[in-house]
Amino acid sequence: MAAGSIDAPWRGFASDNYAGVHPEVLEALAAVNVGHQSAYGDDVVTDQARSLVRGHFGAGAEFFPVFNGTGANVVALQSVNHRWQSVICAASAHIHVDEGGAPESMAGMKLWTVPTADGKLRPDDVQGQCFDMEFVHRAQPGAVSITQSSELGTVYSPDEVSALAEVAHANNLALHMDGARLSNAAASLHVPVRAFTVDAGVDLVSFGLTKNGAMAAESVIVLNGDRVQGVDFLRKTSMQLASKMRFLSAQFVAMLTDDLWLRSAGHANAMACRLQDGVGDLSGVTITQSVDANAVFVLLPEQVASRLQERFHFYTWDQATGEVRWMCAWDTTESDVDDFVAAVRGELASGA
């Protein structure tokens, strides 16, 4: 299917990254494009963003805007790992599957991956990797990285995060949270974001808003300065320090003011639930994961999936099983969902 054009806009369910920028974010960018401000984060807009971040993550939170999510993860993991150390993560983790080897090639760290059915690590998964400690022939675990919400659309509860923090800290490991879709997790859990981050023992977060209606708004947020070192220097050496930082920070200000971030994520989640409800009773459709956030994973007959992909953008997640992923975004409409559900019904009927 063609990628489309500005003159012929199209809608799809491939990724929340495909969606545009929220109008309120564009307004915020225009509003700060006046006069001069100091560069590299020494500006009033970034100060405002820091204050808003601390309101959500606690008074001790340190805020470091970066350009993209991979950069946030690489900077964050470097700050809690030495070169000889490793990171424990789910086999489906974005840092392992979707970052082109950046943690390994840019930060020089080994990833110890654990297969999980739902994308979520458990305490036993972490403990099971804590062997041969001090053994020079094994890359030494230095951190645990979890994704909230996970790559399979599932969400960690505050208690699940706390349990992971407990086992990580008992083994002298830092706990990192990849939060590219942290907003969707917060909207799903209906609790303050600090309940499953700083209050649950998370040491640092890669907090992103790009998938939730921003243009380029990612960050590293340090929650426990005792375990994290040198983020400001690592951000520079990793080529993630923005000179005109006010334009990154303005997006955080727009999203974190009046809960735009939470409202947008809640809408995306609601559209995923609508999609789940629309196809859940169809013969030939198997929903494979709990729909906790804004993703729906399903198994379809191969020919049905192929025909749908000629009309709608979405990814085949698992080439071996044919499992596909449908993502909803801040701008997904009820009509988008209903039209897609009707198409699924039609293709299944045609196939039958």
Image: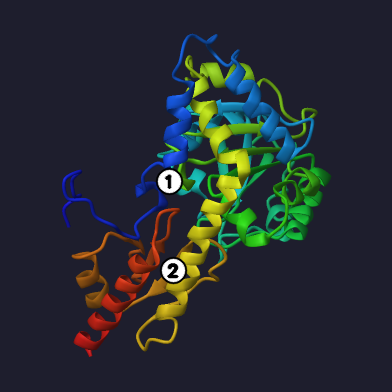
Q: Secondary structure at mark 2?
A: strand
> Depth check: 113 or 155 in front?
155
Residue 113 visible in the shown view = no
* Residue 126 shown left or right of residue 207 in the figure: right
Q: Residue drawn at (52%, 21%), measured in percent from left and top?
A: 246
User: Could you tell me residue 299's position as x and y percent?
Assistant: 38, 75
**How many tags in the picture?**
2
User: Could you tell me residue 65's position as x and y percent?
Assistant: 56, 27
Q: Amino acid at mark 1?
A: Asp
User: Could you tell me residue 343's position as x and y percent?
Assistant: 26, 76
User: Disc 2 and disc 1: Cα gap in Å?
Assistant: 18 Å
Q: Secondary structure at mark 1?
A: loop
Q: Is 146 rendered above or below residue 327? A: above
What quarter of the picture does the C terminus occupy? bottom left
> Depth check: 330 or 157 in front?
330
What quarter of the picture does the N terminus occupy? bottom left
* Mark 2 nearby-residue class (10 Å; few <14, some 14–19, many ≥20): many
> On residue 232, which mark appears?
none
> On residue 98, which mark appears?
1
Q: Residue drawn at (40%, 39%), measured in percent from left and top?
A: 100
Q: From the viewer's perspective, is the residue at label 2 or at label 1 nearer?
A: 2
* Residue 107 shown left or right of residue 323 in the figure: right
